[in-house]
């Protein structure tokens, strides 16, 4: 029998910049997907905005499937991204073709933080260039009096690193070149549309669908509360 899953469709919009100036070895290492340095991505994005025109970046209609009946070793939920239109105008005027996508929902990270991680292997429509797009949302403890603002900011802001790859899809991108960074967001109208796309699959009985939704949203809420309130 198919595993119970929750499906939803997500769109994020924002801007990116090309890495036109040399980076230090420490910066290059910090932009690899194994490291999640949101401050560095924001710094590079802001710095390169002064010397070049930022380009539009839209991750449109990402079809995300999350398995709800088990958690990973890091206490997150694993998922796949099976479709979407990936616009990165600084790399190609046409949307990139999605070859493979992975999603992690709120695994534990360092210092009691949680993450939402997106990994997309894409290529240009002519198949001549391939890219690995890595993005993460950082859920971090802050001032409890500003909790609603922090909740919205953390769950809707994605920090993006784009690497030019030699073979995609593939697992090891540590040696690939960082070609761009960016910051994209879920806008309010896109968020409201996203809420309307949630579906339960892999179960048959009506009550089982209710239980599947409950398991997903309970995990989501509990994971956030462990960061913000504990």
Image: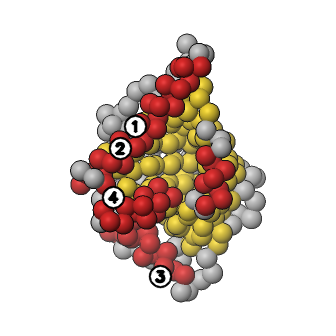
Regarding residue 109, the answer to whether it shows in the image is: no
Residue for point 36% across, 66% down: 146
Upstream in the sequence, badge 3 or badge 2? 3
- What residue is shown with label 3? 47
Across and down, in percent, residue 221 comes to 40, 43
The answer to whether marks 3 and 1 mark residues whose Cβ atoms lie closer than 8 Å is no
For label 3, count other residues whose C-alpha is less than 10 Å away and answer few (under 14), some (14-19) or many (20+).
Answer: few
Residue for point 38% across, 31% down: 71
Q: Is residue 79 above or below residue 143?
A: above
Give the distance between the C-alpha atoms of the residues marked 4 and 1, in whole angstroms. 17 Å
For label 2, count other residues whose C-alpha is less than 10 Å away and answer few (under 14), some (14-19) or many (20+).
Answer: many
Is 61 in front, or is 217? 217
Give the distance between the C-alpha atoms of the residues marked 2 and 1, in whole angstroms. 6 Å
Upstream in the sequence, badge 4 or badge 1? 4
- What residue is shown with label 4? 140
Upstream in the sequence, badge 4 or badge 3? 3
- What residue is shown with label 2? 223
Across and down, in percent, residue 87 comes to 68, 59
Give the distance between the C-alpha atoms of the residues marked 4 and 3, in whole angstroms. 24 Å
Give the distance between the C-alpha atoms of the residues marked 3 and 1, in whole angstroms. 38 Å
Q: Which mark is residue 219?
A: 1
Quarter holding the N terminus is top right
**Is label 4 or label 3 in front?**
4
Across and down, in percent, residue 147 comes to 37, 61
Q: In the picture provided, is 131 more to the left or to the right than 69?
A: right
Residue 8 found in image quarter:
top right
Upstream in the sequence, badge 3 or badge 1? 3
The answer to whether marks 4 and 1 mark residues whose Cβ atoms lie closer than 8 Å is no
Give the structural element (helix, strand or loop) at label 1. Answer: helix
Q: Which mark is residue 6?
A: none
**Is label 4 or label 1 in front?**
1
Give the structural element (helix, strand or loop) at label 4. Answer: loop
């Amino acid at each position: 029998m198919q595993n119970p899953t929750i499906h939803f469709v997500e769109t994020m919009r924002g801007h990116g910049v090309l890495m036109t100036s040399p980076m230090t070895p420490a910066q290059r290492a910090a932009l690899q997907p194994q490291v999640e340095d949101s401050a560095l991505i924001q710094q590079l994005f802001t710095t390169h905005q002064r010397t070049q025109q930022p380009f539009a970046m839209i991750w449109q209609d990402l079809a995300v499937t999350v398995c709800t009946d088990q958690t990973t070793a890091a206490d997150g939920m694993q998922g796949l991204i099976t479709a979407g239109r990936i616009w990165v105008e600084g790399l190609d005027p046409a949307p990139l073709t999605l070859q493979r996508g992975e999603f992690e929902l709120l695994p534990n990270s360092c210092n009691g933080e949680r993450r939402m991680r997106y990994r997309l292997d894409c290529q240009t429509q002519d198949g001549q260039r391939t890219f690995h797009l890595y993005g993460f949302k950082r859920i971090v403890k802050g001032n409890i009096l500003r909790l609603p603002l922090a909740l919205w900011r953390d769950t809707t802001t994605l920090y993006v690193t784009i690497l030019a790859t030699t073979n995609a899809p593939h697992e090891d991108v540590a040696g690939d070149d960082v070609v761009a960074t960016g910051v994209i967001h879920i806008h309010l109208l896109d968020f409201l549309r996203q809420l309307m796309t949630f579906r339960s699959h892999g179960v048959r009985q009506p009550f089982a669908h209710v239980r599947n939704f409950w398991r997903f949203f309970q995990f989501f809420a509990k994971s956030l509360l462990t960061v913000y309130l504990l």
